[in-house]
Structures are given as C-alpha cells and as structure tokens.
Amino acid sequence: MHLVGRFFGSLWPGPPRAEDDDWARQQLLPGEVQLWNRMCNQDRRHSIGVARETINLLGGSAERPVIAAALLHDVGKVQSNLGTFHRVVATLSAGIAGRETAELWVRSSGITRRIGLYLTHPEIGGDLLEMAGSDSLTSTWAREHHKPQDQWTLPADITAALNEADND
C-alpha cells in the first residue's frame, strides 16, 4: 500500500509548498542544499513528509542530522534521472530479478543502467552525502534505509522513527 500511495502522490509534478521547502533548506548544510536542489519535486515532497513525521515520532531528540537523514534518504535517486513510470518498472524489475542484479545493470548502458542506478540509490546517496560533508548519521541512514533492520548500525530509536516515517 505504501508504494501505491507513493505512486499516486508522484503523479502530481508540482514542487513542495514554498514554506515547506524553505523549512527543509534551513535544516540542511550548504552541500546538502545543493543535493536537495537536484532532487525531483515528488521526492522532495515525500521527504518533507518523512522529516515532519520523524520529528513527531522523536520529539525533541530529532537533531539536525536526523532531520537531514529524513530529508535526504532518497537523494541517490538523482543519479538515475528516472520519471515515475520508469521508477515503477525499476521497482518491478527488482522484484523479478532481485536487487543484487542491479549492480550488474549499473555497468550496462541506456535505460538498464538508469534502472540499476535507481535500485542502488541507497549506496549512491550515502556517497553523495559524504562528499557533501554531511554528518555520518545522515549518510549512513541514506546507505542503510533499504537494508533489513538487523543490518542497521545507527541507534535503534532513530532508525525505528526514520523507517516508520518513510514507510507509513
């Protein structure tokens, strides 16, 4: 159901509300703002919702790196440059071929390469955030957010909130 909701929400191409976008930018370091600017409108709208819900779940313990992790967890998707319908194809492809196949696709060309980049967005995002000077918590969550819970390395309360907010 989560992915169905994300699909229908992604059909509207508009940007986040100006006040939400301004709020998000205030939470980010300068290098992170540059990455935020590269994200598509749909991903930015989704990420603002994830960040707001993370704050609701954590209350006062939602520090800036946690909020940045919520806002930028999907930043690696910028490398694939896929629109909504190709993202659906990528997600279905991963279900059929397995996510481990994505690493092979990254080494190919054309749409297959772009699908591979989309499916490996957690690792790509973690690398982009490290290069942008992000806190290690922010880059680690981008890298780990699709891994099974037993592979998360961040504090349990933070990862539980980030995961719940992203998958509500």
Image (tube, grey):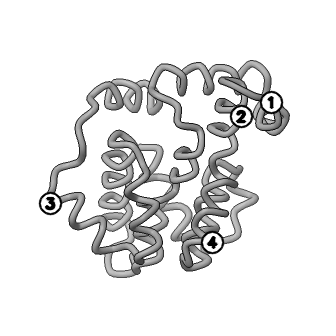
Residue mark closest to the camera, 4 vs 1: 1
CA distance for labels 3 and 2: 34 Å
Judging by the rendered image, the residue that carries numbered circle 2 is 116
**Marked residue nearer the N-terminal end (1 or 2):** 1
Mark 4 closeness class: few <14, some 14–19, many ≥20 residues within 10 Å: some
Which amino acid is tagged 2?
Gly
Judging by the rendered image, the residue that carries numbered circle 3 is 19
CA distance for labels 4 and 3: 27 Å
* Residue 116 falls in image quadrant: top right
Residue at the location (57% across, 67% down)? 129
Which amino acid is tagged 1?
Ser
* Label 2 element class: helix
Left or right of 130, for residue 167: left
Residue at the location (63% across, 20% down)? 92
Against 16, residue 25 (above or below) is below
Judging by the rendered image, the residue that carries numbered circle 1 is 108
Task: Evaluate if marks 4 and 3 touch, with contact meaning CB atoms under 8 Å apart.
Answer: no
In this rendered view, identify the residue nearer to me: 66 or 33.
33
Mark 3 closeness class: few <14, some 14–19, many ≥20 residues within 10 Å: few
Judging by the rendered image, the residue that carries numbered circle 4 is 130
* Label 4 element class: helix
CA distance for labels 3 and 1: 41 Å
